[in-house]
Image: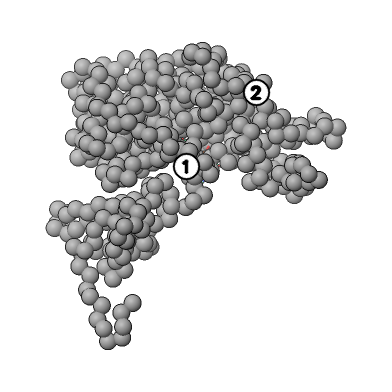
Amino acid sequence: MSEIGEEKPKENVERVVEGCRIMVKMVSQNEWRQAEIISRSRAQNGMMKFYVHYIDCNRRLDEWVTEDLIDLSSLKMPQRGGKKGGAGGHKGGDDAPDAHDSKKSQGRKRKIPLLPVEVETKPETAPDALPTPAVPSGSTPSLRGSMSMVGHSEDAMTRIRNIDCIELGRSRIQPWYFSPYPQQLTHLDCIYICEFCLKYLKSQTCLKRHMQKCQLCHPPGNQIYSHDKLSFFEIDGRKNKSYAQNLCLIAKLFLDHKTLYYDTDPFLFYVLTEEDEKGHHIVGYFSKEKESAEEYNVACILVLPPFQKKGYGSLLIEFSYELSKIEQKTGSPEKPLSDLGLLSYRSYWSMAIMKELFAFKRNFGFDREITVQDLSQATAIKREDVVSTLQQLDLYKYYKGQYVIVISDEKRQVYEKRIQDSKKKLRINPAALQWKPKEFGKKRTQSIF
Ligand SMILES: CC(=O)SCCNC(=O)CCNC(=O)[C@H](O)C(C)(C)COP(=O)(O)OP(=O)(O)OC[C@H]1O[C@@H](n2cnc3c(N)ncnc32)[C@H](O)[C@@H]1OP(=O)(O)O
């Protein structure tokens, strides 16, 4: 605060550096918000432009703004000795604490080795093929594993969205986050991706030439589910490395809190497609470790933006639990979850658990009490997730020295209606799933059945 009569020094745009906080007018909305400066550079018209992260917003909204959209009088310099990235120093995709699971810290304990780029992962010999993704030196992503847990890098380079647009099948999609595509592609207006083999190309001409040669009209691997034009293909990350890596590169464009790795060997990929006369078009996917000591049944899950909010996310989640039921295991998604991941899982868990509670009541009335273990076995949802869902729904009460599940009449009515409405939604037909779990070496997880 300046004293009366004392003139506040005029802020100069040159003082706006990485880590500062300042009020910014959001490009897409007519709203001023406090933002952190992630990077700065000069626009072609000579004006300064800044890549900003809006405080308390998901990084999907991060964007470049020109100097005329910042309020210099609100400039706050980074605190000396403070966390990296100014006072913000945010690590997760959101600043909001609730966006991630409480086991957030677990997701960061794995140390990421930095290894050289794997040259053999280069796309095949096609003349229009592009080199292996280049990783900015000294920055994540590391080159081991698949897209996996571990918080993202604090490197400014990987905090900036580097691809403007991708064309995939009939859709042009604006990415949300950084993905380590080759650096020479980051200057293009659009990257063209073959919707069947997922190879990335630098122009429409290259894509057309590639499409004349590409043999695929569906993802590689085995079709393990087919119902009402929807299919699931199971892809082994070891056998179809190039496809799996290209899928991870696409997924990283929409996943902020995961670090991209290139060793896809330990993962299976379940790709959901919609079929038409041209073939099976990718809608989304989830990956799963072949062996998971932590009983994760999903590593990463993605519905491509043009298909989001239509029920495909719930369908992928339901499918992951159908696989766990066949394996006779319970499972859980890898942590941390993104904000949208958490919303989707909470919604799925609530419905699955409520359905089971009602079915149990219909079958047993008051003759038997249902336990968390019963719910976990029937839904394949891991015990902890059952408990957290019951708590979230305020159904888990401590009564006479033990926990009991209690549903009020009001809540019962709400959920009966929701279950009725959900019958119109996309559902997995378990009879259309042809799958047997494979043995990938010695099992470390314990079966609960
Ligand atoms: C383990 C992990 O990988 S966590 C990371 C999860 N993945 C990501 O964050 C990647 C980017 N996001 C996505 O790919 C998608 O948003 C997904 C996969 C999370 C969800 O897919 P969608 O197809 O949009 O989900 P779907 O339409 O089935 O909706 C599921 C529920 O989440 C809610 N939901 C989904 N997106 C939103 C949103 N943007 N805003 C509010 N609610 C939402 C829906 O309302 C629905 O709840 P309801 O059934 O109670 O109505």
Q: Position of residue 423 (x, y in %)?
A: 64, 34
Q: Nearer the viewer, residue 88 or 427?
A: 88
Q: Position of residue 190 (x, y in %)?
A: 25, 37
Q: Position of residue 187 (x, y in %)?
A: 19, 40
Q: What residue does disc 1 label?
A: 105
Quadrant (top left, top right, bottom left, bottom right) of the C terminus? top right
Relative to 226, residue 172 above or below = below
The coloring applied to the image is one colour
Residue at image location 41% in from the left, 26% down from the top:
281
Q: Nearer the viewer, residue 399 or 288?
A: 399
Would residue 10 be seen by someone viewing this image from the given angle? yes
Would residue 36 be seen by someone viewing this image from the given angle? no
Three-letter code, disc 1: Ser
Q: Quadrant of residue 403?
A: top right
Three-letter code, disc 2: Ile
Q: Quadrant of residue 47?
A: bottom left
**Precedes in sequence: disc 1 or disc 2:** 1
Q: How far is disc 1 from disc 2 in space, using C-alphas?
A: 27 Å
Sort mark 1 into few (<14), some (14-19) or many (20+) by Cα contacts within 10 Å.
some
Q: Which mark is residue 448?
A: 2
Query: Left or right: where does residue 242 sit relative to residue 12?
Result: right
Quadrant (top left, top right, bottom left, bottom right) of the N terminus? bottom left
Q: Nearer the viewer, residue 140 or 430?
A: 140
Secondary element under disc 1, as helix, strand or loop, is helix
Hey, which residue is sitting farthest front in the picture? Answer: 81
Hey, which residue is sitting farthest right in the picture? Answer: 367
Q: Nearer the viewer, residue 392 or 214?
A: 392
Relative to 217, residue 346 above or below = below
Query: Left or right: where does residue 95 sit relative to residue 393?
Result: left
Secondary element under disc 2, as helix, strand or loop, is loop
**Which is in the foreground here, disc 1 or disc 2?**
1
Residue at image location 26% in from the left, 83% down from the top:
6
